[in-house]
Amino acid sequence: MTAIATLGSHCSLQVLKGARDEGIKSILICEKKRERLYRRFNFIDELILVDSFHEILDHRCNSILEKNNAILIPHGTLIAQMSSKEIESIKIPIFGNKSILRWESDRSLKEKLMLEAKLNVPKSVFSPREINKLVIAKRHGAAGGKGYFMATTEAEYNKKRDNLISQGIIKGDDDLYLQEYASGVLAYLQYFYSPLKEELEFFGVDKRHESDIDGLARIPSQLQMKMDEVSSFNVIANSPLVLRESLLSEVYSMGERFVAAAKRLVSPGMNGPFCIEGVYDADAKFWSFEFSARIVAGTNIFMQGSPYSTLFYDEPMSMGRRIAREVKNAESSKQIDKIVT
Ligand code: ATP
């Protein structure tokens, strides 16, 4: 029997509850400092206690996981804390496509895949000297928006960059990627692609609350002008959205183009959960600035299912449970190779 394992953070509760709901053994790789928290949840069958998540690469952790026939479910904490090389060297099978996680972490690979999928991506700005409209400066990797800032001129950019350098958040220009700022309604589109059924399911949509860029809107502009702080986009929470139904056909089309593009560029493609992240502008055109090639934390909102998963399933279906269902179906049809790398 296969087990499902994940790192104790991000969406691990949802993933392991989903495993339990599908009758699959659940294993948490848990930092010792969080043991008390995770012992509260009786759907977690086994905890592997570690000092650092890097121990997943060590013999002890690996052999427990191997003995349990475990599949690792990757999430944002894995991407944030480990390099692509380390992730690719994990010995146990990883759900989905571990090669595509490198494409998520590398801004130029990321853009290549998004353009191949014919998504509308805000233009990159290659040098601070080229800044002539509102841009956002973002750090590489999954920094979760921390330390990101906006600028409209090179001088403003330099000032804010130097501020981040003095705080030790970045070392210099090379740590930042500049992109035109897309204004509108933020939407994070959550999908699941089943390599077994060869079918795309649109699972839900959320918006993020980011500090303190969201707080800025509550301050009158006269007072904003007097402020010297650099606002950040540090993600704090997510809340659910439902889209106008007329937008759904393009939502599916974007997801399908993304799956097809990933098949062409990063074999075996975009299997399992993923998210296309962006902004609807005043003409309801979607500008995508980002994708996540694995489950996103915004799915935690829908532990009981979402307005969209309800259209496919007559039972509460979270993304975590959907992953476990795919594992179960693959196991019973002897196709585990199709769902892991
Ligand atoms: P994560 O890996 O957690 O998704 P990240 O570090 O890769 O985050 P992004 O998702 O690219 O970063 O950006 C973080 C936030 O910055 C977004 O949620 C959004 O609010 C804002 N943002 C990023 N790019 C743009 C853009 N081009 N236009 C408008 N807002 C943007």
Image: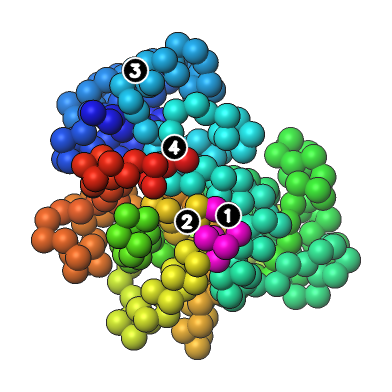
Quick check: 81 left or right of 61? right
Mark 3: secondary structure: helix
Tag 2 residue: 270
Query: How many circles with numbers are drawn on the protein?
Result: 4
Mark 2: secondary structure: loop
Q: Earlier in the sequence, mark 3 or mark 2?
A: 3
Q: Residue at x 49, y 13 (%)?
A: 59
Name the amino acid, label 4.
Ile
Quick check: 126 left or right of 238? right
Q: Earlier in the sequence, mark 4 or mark 3?
A: 3
Name the amino acid, label 1.
Val
Name the amino acid, label 3.
Lys
Mark 1: secondary structure: loop
Residues at badges 1 and 2 in contact (C-beta under 8 Å)? yes
Find the distance from the CA under tag 3 to the CA under tag 2.
28 Å
Instruction: Please state which of residues 282 and 126 is positioned toward the viewer in this rendering.
Output: 126
| Residue 278 in view of the camera | no
The label on residue 67 is 3
The label on residue 245 is none
Q: Where residue 80 sits: x, y (%)?
A: 56, 38
